[in-house]
Image (cartoon, helix red, strand yellow):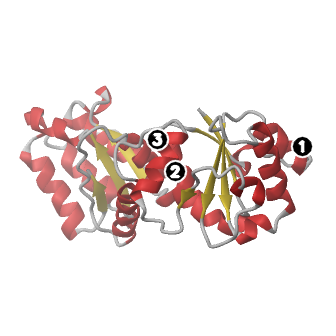
């Protein structure tokens, strides 16, 4: 489902760091200005053209929003599509104590109240009406994201354990693309990483150190030389449960990785 997000740029940080990641991870196709607008074209024309593609319109209503002529323009266009709020096309979201305008209060829609950003039930209401499913509580999803970011910023390793139907790929994508772009990814289900030599080659490659890795046991000294350039590397090893099936990796590999993480401080891992 295509979801247009109408908001004031004064709430842009919250929209970028919380609202959009949650809706996108829930399966919504987000239509938002910083991804869709192009330089050299009229602002209002691009607003209208982007908004016209939407199935749902999320209105992030604050005092700043109601004071902006551009935001009010988007709100009015959305409400004209469903003025009696009978089709569920328009989803008002309250972020502060601003008084809702009569065009919203008179039809009395059930708005989403996120003045408390940790209100899990309100997040579920928003996600459900946007046509998605996060698979867990949105505040917990965001908290895990922020905690992983803080740990990585402190060069602390992260162990992510996923239960249930959570789309962890969307979570990891958000972490890598916006929260911590220095994090590179090695997928243990990629055939290139099936062998120990291949895994080491992939770790070097994603960290910008492509080099020829010899067969064991000379692969471990080559790995050490590859990472011994005073650049700390941050690598996510996904599908790490596959390690239990790959006895050929050998305990000496994990001893070497432990040394590089704990003693040499060359590596920081998210597994």
Residue 98 vertical position relative to residue 43 in the rendered view, above or below? below
Query: Which of the labelled discs sits on residue 45, or is there none?
Result: 1
Residue ID at (79%, 57%): 71
Report crowding for label 2: few under 14, some 14 to 19, many 20 or more residues within 10 A (C-alpha).
many
The residues bearing labels 1 and 3 have C-alpha atoms spaced at a distance of: 29 Å
Residue 22 x, y percent position in the rendering = 49, 50
SS class of the residue under badge 1? helix
**Is residue 215 in sight in this rendering?**
no
Residue ID at (77%, 54%): 103
Residue ID at (33%, 49%): 236
Report crowding for label 1: few under 14, some 14 to 19, many 20 or more residues within 10 A (C-alpha).
few
As rendered, which of 265 and 32 lies closer to the eye?
32
Question: Considering only order in the chain, which callout, 2 or 3, is on the residue closer to the N terminus?
Answer: 2
Report crowding for label 3: few under 14, some 14 to 19, many 20 or more residues within 10 A (C-alpha).
many
Residue 221 x, y percent position in the rendering = 21, 51
Question: Considering only order in the chain, which callout, 2 or 1, is on the residue closer to the N terminus?
Answer: 2
Question: Considering only order in the chain, which callout, 3 or 1, is on the residue closer to the N terminus?
Answer: 3
Between label 3 and label 2, give the one nearer the viewer. 3
User: For mark 3, what is the residue?
Assistant: 26
């Amino acid at each position: 489902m295509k979801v247009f997000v109408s908001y004031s740029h004064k709430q842009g940080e919250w929209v970028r760091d919380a609202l959009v990641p949650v809706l996108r991870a829930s399966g919504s196709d987000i239509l938002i200005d910083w991804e869709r607008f192009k330089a050299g074209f009229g602002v209002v024309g691009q607003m209208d053209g982007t908004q016209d593609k939407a199935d749902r319109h999320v209105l992030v209503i604050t005092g700043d929003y109601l004071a902006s002529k551009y935001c009010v323009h988007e709100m009015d266009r959305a409400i004209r599509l469903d003025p009696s709020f009978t089709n569920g096309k328009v989803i008002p979201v309250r972020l502060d104590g601003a008084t809702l305008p009569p065009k919203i209060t008179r039809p009395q829609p059930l708005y989403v109240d996120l003045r408390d950003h940790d209100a899990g039930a309100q997040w579920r209401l928003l996600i459900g009406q946007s046509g998605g499913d996060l698979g867990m509580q949105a505040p917990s999803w965001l908290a895990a994201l922020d905690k992983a970011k803080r740990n990585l910023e402190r060069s602390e390793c992260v162990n992510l354990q996923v239960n249930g139907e959570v789309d962890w790929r969307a979570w990891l994508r958000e972490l890598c693309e916006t929260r911590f772009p220095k994090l590179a990814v090695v997928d243990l289900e990629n055939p290139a990483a099936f062998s120990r030599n291949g895994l080491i080659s992939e770790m070097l490659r994603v960290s910008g150190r492509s080099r020829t890795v010899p067969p064991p046991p000379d692969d471990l000294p080559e790995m050490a030389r590859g990472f011994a350039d005073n650049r700390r590397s941050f690598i996510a090893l996904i599908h790490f449960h596959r390690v239990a099936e790959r006895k050929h990796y050998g305990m000496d590999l994990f001893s070497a990785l432990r040394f590089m993480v704990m003693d040499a401080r060359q590596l920081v891992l998210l597994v």
